[in-house]
């Protein structure tokens, strides 16, 4: 990211902070109740994503709703919420958004532009070391949750949360060292991009190399030298990690999980899964269900003279039968 890009990023956050201070920054958050779904034309992330509208518009679609994000508007998409994006330029300016993503002790900020009609992609990206990442995540998650609730102090709380979150972003842009842009940093950036976009079936070494401004051969060689792992293998491994989370936390079919994890062929997904985990996705899910069944059969509460298999009984109810099982 150039000095000009950094200056533009600082100016964008300064402007957003002024709007938030005057209660003029529109906040948009989807109200999806069932996260981690596989929906055609949509994708999701395992951490929240933040969009700051700069120029043009973004039409977000979700399984049950949709809305348009315009200039001077902020959107927070909670973790696991499937969404699609269609962008349009403004009357006299091209489309442009500022997007934030979160990783382990690191966050990314990138400018999105229109690569072909309606489709956004990364124009320039910067990664920042963020030891206090949990603070960013707490603010983003709490802002999204507060937006969907009602209360006498809702607007005041939202204003404070937005100012704190945007202020932290503004500070990290100002103080970030940019040390991640070295060759070793390219390996780190490649890892972050894989974790962010593993659900994209088109993600590969070529795509990542273009985003990082180097050749695929160089990136593959550098990645292997630094990690002792091939980049193609790393992409597969992260996709399998994502599929495991879906197997453990959702009721999606094996085929749906395959597509949501970036595999275009469920049969190939099953083969790769077995190579990595020593078992098929179906066998893995059956083993999880068996473990849950064993846990469900255990007593919920153990007293000095009896055990209780119920999940709790309202006060005044007879618990003798439940406690004597």
Image (spheres, rainbow, N blue to C red):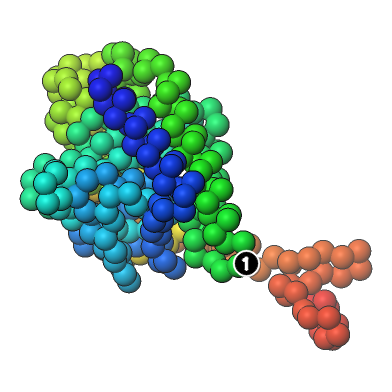
Q: How crowded is mark 1: few (under 14 residues within 10 Å), some or many (20 or more)?
A: few
Tell me, yes or no, if residue 140 can be seen here: no
Apparent side of residue 200 relative to residue 13 in the rendered image (left or right): left
The front one of 269 and 172 is: 172
Residue extending farthest left: 117
Question: In x, y percent, where is residue 235?
Answer: 28, 36
Question: In x, y percent, where is residue 254?
Answer: 31, 60
Q: Where, by quadrant of the figure, is residue 183 drawn? A: top left
Q: Where, by quadrant of the figure, is residue 203 drawn? A: top left
Residue appearing at x 16%, y 20% in the figure: 214
| Mark 1, residue position | 152
The front one of 85 and 219 is: 85
The front one of 264 and 135 is: 135
User: What quarter of the picture does the C terminus occupy?
Assistant: bottom right
Question: In x, y percent, where is residue 261?
Answer: 29, 50
Tell me, yes or no, if residue 124 can be seen here: yes
Q: Is residue 211 above or below residue 250?
A: above
């Amino acid at each position: 990211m150039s000095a000009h890009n950094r200056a533009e990023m600082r100016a964008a956050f300064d402007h957003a902070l002024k709007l938030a201070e005057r209660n003029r920054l529109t906040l948009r958050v989807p109200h999806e109740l069932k996260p981690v779904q596989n929906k055609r034309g949509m994708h999701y992330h395992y951490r929240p994503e933040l969009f700051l509208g700069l120029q043009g518009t973004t039409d977000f679609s979700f399984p049950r709703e949709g809305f348009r994000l315009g200039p001077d508007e902020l959107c927070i998409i909670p973790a696991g919420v499937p969404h699609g994006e269609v962008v349009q330029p403004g009357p006299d300016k091209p489309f442009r958004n500022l997007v934030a993503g979160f990783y382990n002790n690191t966050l990314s900020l990138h400018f999105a532009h229109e690569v072909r009609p309606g489709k956004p992609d990364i124009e320039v990206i910067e990664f920042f070391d963020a030891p206090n990442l949990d603070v960013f995540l707490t603010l983003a998650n709490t802002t999204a949750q507060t937006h969907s609730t009602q209360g006498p102090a809702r607007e005041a709380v939202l204003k404070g949360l937005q100012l704190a979150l945007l202020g932290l972003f503004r500070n990290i842009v100002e103080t970030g060292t940019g040390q991640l842009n070295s060759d070793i940093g390219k390996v780190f950036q490649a890892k972050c991009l894989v974790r962010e976009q593993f659900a994209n079936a088109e993600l590969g070494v070529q795509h990542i190399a273009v985003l990082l401004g180097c050749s695929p051969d160089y990136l593959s060689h550098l990645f292997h030298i630094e990690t002792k792992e091939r980049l193609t293998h790393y992409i597969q491994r992260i996709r399998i990690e994502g599929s495991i989370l879906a197997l453990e936390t959702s009721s999606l079919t094996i085929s749906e999980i395959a597509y949501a994890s970036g595999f275009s062929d469920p049969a190939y997904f099953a083969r790769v899964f077995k190579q990595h985990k020593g078992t098929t996705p179906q066998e893995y899910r059956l083993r999880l269900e068996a473990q849950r069944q064993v846990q469900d059969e255990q007593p919920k509460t153990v007293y000095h003279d009896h055990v209780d298999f119920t999940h709790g009984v309202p006060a005044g109810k007879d618990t003798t039968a439940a406690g004597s099982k």
